[in-house]
Amino acid sequence: MTIPGIGIFVGRGWESNLGLLRHEFGHILQYRKWGFLLFWRQIAPDSLKSAWKAEKSILNHMETWTEWSANKLSFDYFNQPDNWNFFQFPIKPPIGSLTGKPKFTVDNDEFVREWLEG
C-alpha cells in the first residue's frame, strides 16, 4: 500500500520484492503526475475497490487501470528495466477488460495518449 507523502507499506517478508516496490512507487508517480485530487478521488478509491473485489472473486487487481498505469509509470521511470515481470506487473491494459479503463476517459487509447504519455 502506498500513501503519497507518507511512504510505501508492505507486509513482513515483502521488503525485498523489487517488483512490488517498483509497482507501489508507481502510485507515488501517479500522485506526482496527476495531483492530489485525481489521486484521492479516482485512483485510491478505484484501487481499493479493485483490491477488495480481487479478494472476493477472480478479478485480477493488476488489470485495473490504477494498477497497470502505476506499473507503466514506474517501468518508464526506472528506464524500462530488463528484469521487469510483465506477467505480475503489466504495463498496459488487457484486451477487452472491463476494469482496464478509467471512468473519465472514452477508452484506453485515449487514456494512454492523453494521460500517460501526455
Image (cartoon, rainbow, N blue to C red):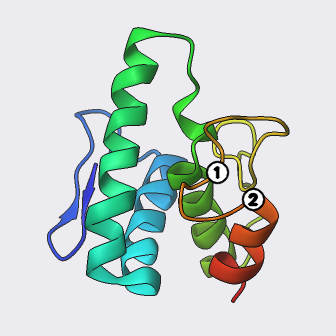
* Residue 65: percent from left, percent from top: 58, 51
> Is 81 situated left or right of 34 in this image?
right
Q: Secondary structure at mark 2?
A: helix
The residue labelled by disc 1 is 101
| Label 1 CA crowd tier, 10 Å (few <14, some 14–19, many 20+) | many
Quarter of the figure that contains the C terminus: bottom right
Left or right placement of residue 97 versus residue 70 in this view: right
Q: Residue at x 24, y 71 (%)?
A: 4
Secondary structure beneath dot 1 equals loop
The disc label shown at residue 108, or none: 2
Pinpoint residue 91: horizontal percent, then vertical percent. 71, 56
Residue reaching furthest to the top: 57
User: Rounded to the nearest whole Å, what is the CA distance between mark 1 and mark 2?
Assistant: 5 Å
Instruction: Examine the rendered structure and indicate whether residue 19 appears above or below residue 81.
Output: above
Q: Reply above or below: 97 against 37.
A: above
Please say if 80 is above or below 59. Answer: below
Which amino acid lies under the numbered mark 1 shown in the image of this protein?
A: Lys
